[in-house]
Amino acid sequence: MEQKEIGLYVHIPFCKKKCYYCDFTSFSGKEACYEKYVNCLKQEIIKYGTENKTMSKHNLEPEYIVKTIYIGGGTPSIIDEKYITNILDTIKQNFKLKQNTEITIEVNPGTVTKHKLETYKECGINRLSIGLQASQDEILKTIGRIHTYEDFLETYNLARNLGYNNINVDLMINLPGQTLDDVKKTIKNIIALKPEHISIYSLILEENTKLYEMVNSKQLSLSSDELERKMYWYVKQKLEENNYIH
Ligand SMILES: C[S@@+](CC[C@H](N)C(=O)[O-])C[C@H]1O[C@@H](n2cnc3c(N)ncnc32)[C@H](O)[C@@H]1O
Ligand code: SF4
């Protein structure tokens, strides 16, 4: 029987509070929907799993084998950890997983507890992606993040102490009020922590976000294209010097 490796992406569209720059599909204040959403997800997983088994049984499709699972958002760490266990159990019951499947969950500082990280580990999650963006609290406040740099460090160290050995950190450049010096300090701080992966995004000013309104009404201004490029080339060079492959 022919097999085809696939990656599954599971979206959790809930956040504690919407960051001002973000236009990902995510909503705050929807706690009443968490359970209903997870139940719908499980039904969808069962439906695709059953379809896949039937198709491969009749030689209409190769059988899918799951190589990676990515639970993203939104903020997956905002919902009760029992839901994450439920979702992963449903996937395992309905799909074949490769040995050592990489299973990632996105977590936000300010929404993580020791118990949550322990539960994730018990259900096979072996990679974390932590959103930080910048190490200056003033910038975090300007872009509407719910946490401080200290909160991020707490989450990061907790994860390391619990044995997570594959961690990504999300950072952003070109943020309002962010200087090249701020970027240099953030990069230095994060490199010192030695995460396995660092993702850097240059801000995209998305329509219909609070940041878009703030920039349009001149409450905030963005940096020049020249400064954005300086930040980009600095980050690229610094990460390469520290053996992060682009
Ligand atoms: C899927 S988002 C969610 C991750 C997680 N909820 C968090 O905020 O920490 C992944 C990353 O995309 C980046 N991002 C979100 N909106 C962006 C925008 N408008 N421009 C550039 N990067 C953005 C941020 O770095 C964020 O951490
Ligand atoms: S926490 Fe992440 S997904 Fe939620 S609003 Fe902020 S950047 Fe977007």
Image (tube, grey):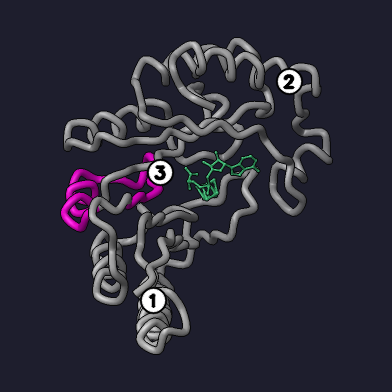
Q: Is residue 120 magenta?
A: yes
SS under mark 2:
helix
Quadrant of the image occupied by residue 95: bottom left
Mark 2 or 3: the one toward you: 2
Q: CA distance from mark 2 to mark 1?
A: 42 Å
Q: Quadrant of residue 223?
A: top right
Q: Which residue is mark 2?
A: 229
Instruction: For ligand 1, tell me if the residue under mark 3 lies within 8 Å.
Output: yes
As helix, strand or loop, the secondary structure at mark 1 comes to: helix
**Up-down relation of residue 162 to residue 126 (above or below):** above
Query: Does residue 57 appear anywhere in the picture?
Result: yes
Assign ligand 1 to one image quadrant: top right
Q: How far across and how far down the image is residue 153, in percent?
A: 33, 27
Q: Is residue 212 above or below residue 175?
A: below
Residue 9, given in percent of the width and then of the height, sits at 45, 60
**Amino acid beneath label 1:** Ile
Q: What residue is pinned by disc 1?
A: 45
Q: Nearer the viewer, residue 202 or 33?
A: 202
Q: Quadrant of the N terminus?
A: bottom left
Whole-percent x and y of residue 131? Answer: 45, 38
Q: Tags 2 and 3 in contact by the CB under 8 Å rule?
A: no
In the rendered structure, which disc, 3 or 1, sits on the residue that comes first in sequence? 1
- Residue drawn 25% across the image and 34% down it: 165
Mark 2: which amino acid? Arg
Tell me if residue 36 can be seen: no
214 or 115, which is in the foreground? 115
Side of 2 relative to 234 (left or right): left
Task: Tell me which label, 2 or 3, sits earlier in the chain.
Answer: 3
What residue is shown at x 20% (from left), y 50% (from top)? 121
Q: Which residues are magenta?
A: 103-124
